[in-house]
Amino acid sequence: MSTRAARRPIVTALVALALVGTTAACAPQPTTQLLTGAAGAGSAAQESVRDSAQDSAPKAAAGATTSGTATAAEDCSDGLPPVASIDPGGSPEVTSGSTMAEIRERGTLRVGVSADTLLMGSRNPFTGDIEGFDIDVARQIADAILGDPEKIQYRVITSGDREAVLEDGDVDIVTRAFTINCDRWENIAFSAEYYHAGQKLLVPSTSKVESIDDLDGQRVCAPEGTTTLERLEQWEGVEAVPAATHTTCLVLFQQGAVDAITGDDTVLAGFAAQDPYAKVVGDAVSDEPYGVGIPAGNADMVRFVNGVLEDMVAGGQWEESYDRWLGDALGAAPSAPEPVYGRTP
């Protein structure tokens, strides 16, 4: 029996343990269920593993060269870079008649999150809490509006749900490894960038793959509804395998149904932490600036969140959160992204 085959039952069991808090309480319920606090259940990880591969004609990589170097994003149609947001204009304040005042009146901040992205947003199988770097950002915003970081109504969503739940008004914000880009600005709004990730590869620890140049003829998984999958589908000679969630990709990887996973380094770091027989390789082939997703009409909320993010960095909470969740996997904390403003409502 091969080393990789021998490890599958053990490591797959670890993934199953990580999903216990997500699936056990209400597995039959749809992923659109509203979850109140960390005690809620239901996740996109409940969806069955999809084994159909996409056989699209490969093209040259867009947004990255075949040598694995990232290319800077082009400006949007308004002449501004994608990461440009709305200037907060001072410290965050909850003013009468504002979006934040409505949230305060309701008593909870509704947040779209992941429950299966270890280190960024995942359910702790022992406590049932949803936790991670993205969750800390949401907690800072809740605390600024409601005076209590616990007053959050979590809604577990897939990557493909992120824009829809904002457009439909189902949540107030999304903190789910949400890459800021021009196309998304057409439908929703974003805060300033709060984390800068990059797309890399997860491969077996025994693999000789070191970059996308080494993937010819191999099956590579990425979640549906992501910029990662869009880029993957354009890699020459690679068989793109879409899946419902990042965790579904990990299960396929551990079952030997795919040869590699591609995704943001933050996500892959979580996978490597779960699977001792996997490693993250390659230089970043993209720039993935994460922002808080906000409904397009809520410019006051954009300003407020940007003020919260500035305070989070200035007060040291950003670095503390990085050290807690990402430091072991990705090394010493980098400088927090400098906010870029100039966009108008």
Image (cartoon, grey):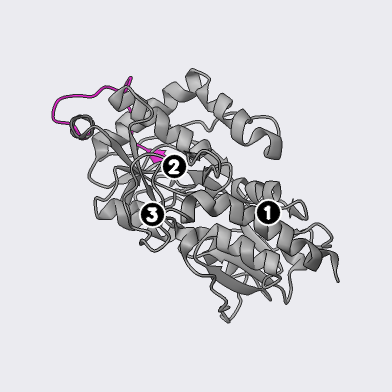
Give the residue at x 47% y 39%.
Answer: 129
Give the residue at x 74% y 73%.
Answer: 216
Report if the CB atoms under discs 3 and 2 are less than 8 Å apart.
no
Q: Left or right: 335 with respect to 332?
A: left
Q: Residue furthest left?
A: 97
Say whether disc 2 or disc 1 marks the residue closer to the N-terminus.
Answer: 1
Tag 3 secondary structure: helix
Q: Say if residue 231 shows up in the picture.
A: no
- Please give the residue where the numbered disc 1 appears in the rendered image: 69
Report if the CB atoms under discs 3 and 1 are less than 8 Å apart.
no
Q: Residue 197: which quarter of the image? A: top right
Say which amino acid is labelled 3: Arg
- Please give the residue where the numbered disc 2 appears in the rendered image: 291
- Rendering coords of residue 174 (x, y %): 38, 45
Gap between marks 3 and 2, in whole Å? Answer: 12 Å
**Magenta-drawn stretch, dominant element (helix, strand or loop):** loop
- Please give the residue where the numbered disc 3 appears in the rendered image: 162
Between 208 and 6, which is closer to the camera in this rendering? 6
Quarter occupied by the C terminus: top left
Quarter occupied by the N terminus: bottom right
Say which amino acid is labelled 2: Gly
Where 261 sits versus 308, above or below?
Answer: below
Tell me if mark 2 has few (under 14), some (14-19) or many (20+) residues whose alpha carbon lies within 10 angstroms of its own. Answer: many
Give the residue at x 49% y 17%.
Answer: 315
- Rendering coords of residue 263 (x, y %): 60, 56
Where 85 sits versus 7, above or below?
Answer: above
Between 103 and 295, which is closer to the camera in this rendering? 103
- Rendering coords of residue 205 (x, y %): 81, 57
Tell me if mark 1 has few (under 14), some (14-19) or many (20+) residues whose alpha carbon lies within 10 angstroms of its own. Answer: some
Tag 1 secondary structure: loop
Asked whether residue 82 is drawn in magenta, I would say no
